[in-house]
Amino acid sequence: MKQEHKIFQGKTLGILSGGGDTPAINSSIEAVRNRASFLGYKVYGIGKGWKGLLGEGEVVDLTNQRYDGWYGGTALGSSRTNPFPSKKNPENRVPQILRNLERYKIDVLVTIGGDDTNGAAKRLYESEGIPVIGFPKTIDNDLRTRTIFHNDGKEIESVLCPGFPSAAMSIAELTASLRTTAESHSRIIVLEVMGRDAGWLTGTASFGGATLGLIPEMEITRERKVVLFESIREAYMKSRKKCLVIPVSEGVRWFDEKTGKVDVVYASSEVDEYGHPRFGGISGIIASEITRKLGIEARAQISGYYARSGPCSPYDRRLTETLADKVADLLLREDYGQMPVMKVMVSYEELEEFNTSSIDMGTIGNKPLPGDYYNVEKFSFTNAYFDFLSLILGKPNLEVFKYDFPVVKPA
Ligand code: F6P
């Protein structure tokens, strides 16, 4: 049978994933691989982000291989390796990367990552002319994707990154589950949530019934702390079963009475090759202050990697497929240095290529949770954020134990 000629026959596309994993990376790899193969590319997977292009290289052939895009994490592995010199690693690894792209005859690179991985890719495109296309990924949902959410006649510049919908589902479900143990002990559970400098993920706890929450975008100064504790007491007393789950971002900036300073709580003094420290431990501090100041029993729970783990959600699956359609379009137009994004915030059914667009990979920076989504006076997430989340998550889980029993008095 005569071989059908495909437009990119004889060319090779490499895919790599860098930074923290998410449940939607395998889905992104599979979706990009399928479309690129259809266009005629041989598709290679590069192991452990940029690290797989150092030394002898770590490259596998993904063309025509079976793949499970529903499985979480990344089958290619990931790292926070920076091709460019950093404080942690002063070596310039760009020559090694160029050498390996040449050795493995990779013509185009698709880099699945956040600001760091895609920022480095963009630099390689600009300084070395490497054809790259970025693919968004982060549970933090803080890349500037410029996704517009139309709400109540207003246009809110929002973010929608693959990985966030699955993580959002996990945090909402975890919050709803924790409520039953909090109810049983009339406790406050302070739930620490990943997200680095942004509160997008923390806010998803409102879908599991959390009424209050703390995010990195709002500093908790000495004065704000007084108001906060009053709000916690009030919310606790108003709650039906005298219990609360309070989600707090790992990157919350908190007034420390001992030092008299406002700062985040670091998990270690180490930074990665992009200069990021690791946060962790704020929930324990807040829980013990609640017990001490309000006399209410409080416990800390760190959700940590739970948000990042597990399978891809249906919304994420379709989102990655839709964005991969846009990658195919960018490949056909040989429009490099770009990243596909959703132009508007839509429900599962409307995740279609006509709702996508592409943006310059050099401009994806960090986008904090917009003021429209958080009420600083009430320490709570707004109805607008609830509406935003309902497009991804459907209905919230606000279920409580339904029955009240008559109180028996002694005879
Ligand atoms: O950026 C994703 C993220 O999960 C952040 O929310 C978190 O601060 C960080 O990665 C944790 O990184 P690591 O995998 O190095 O512990």
Image (cartoon, rainbow, N blue to C red):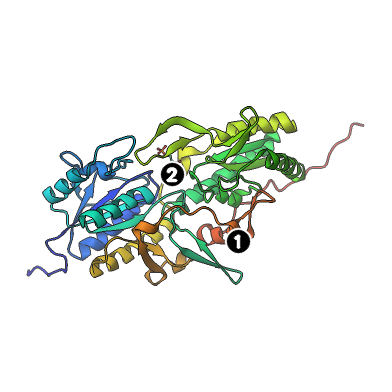
Marking on residue 205? none
Q: For the residue marked with disc 2, what is the amino acid?
A: Arg
What residue do we see at 30% from left, 55% from top?
122
For disc 2, the neighbor class at 10 Å (few under 14, some 14 to 19, many from 20) is many
The answer to whether 297 appears left or right of 216 in the picture is right
Total numbered labels placed on residues in the image: 2
Task: Determine whether the beta carbon of the residue marked 1 sits less than 8 angstroms from the nearest atom of ligand 1.
Answer: no
For this orientation, the residue located farthest to the left is 2
Ligand 1 lies in which image quarter? top left
Q: Which of 213 and 277 is in front in this view?
A: 277
What is the quadrant of the N terminus in the image?
Answer: bottom left
Task: Determine whether the beta carbon of the residue marked 2 sits less than 8 angstroms from the nearest atom of ligand 1.
Answer: yes
Marking on residue 384? 1
Q: What is the C-alpha distance between the residues marked 2 and 1?
A: 25 Å
Q: Which of 99 and 244 is in front in this view?
A: 99
For this orientation, the residue located farthest to the top is 258
Residue 131 place in picture, x, y as percent: 22, 59
Residue 128 place in picture, x, y as percent: 21, 54
What residue do we see at 63% from left, 27% from top?
258
Residue 225 place in picture, x, y as percent: 68, 39
The answer to whether 239 appears left or right of 170 in the picture is right
Q: Is mark 2 on a helix, strand or loop?
A: loop
The label nearer to you, 2 versus 1, is 1
Q: For the residue marked with disc 1, what is the amino acid?
A: Ala
Q: Give the mark nearer the N terminus: 2 vs 1.
A: 2
Q: Is residue 347 visible?
A: no
Residue 346 place in picture, x, y as percent: 48, 66
Q: Is mark 1 on a helix, strand or loop?
A: helix
Residue topped by disc 2: 308
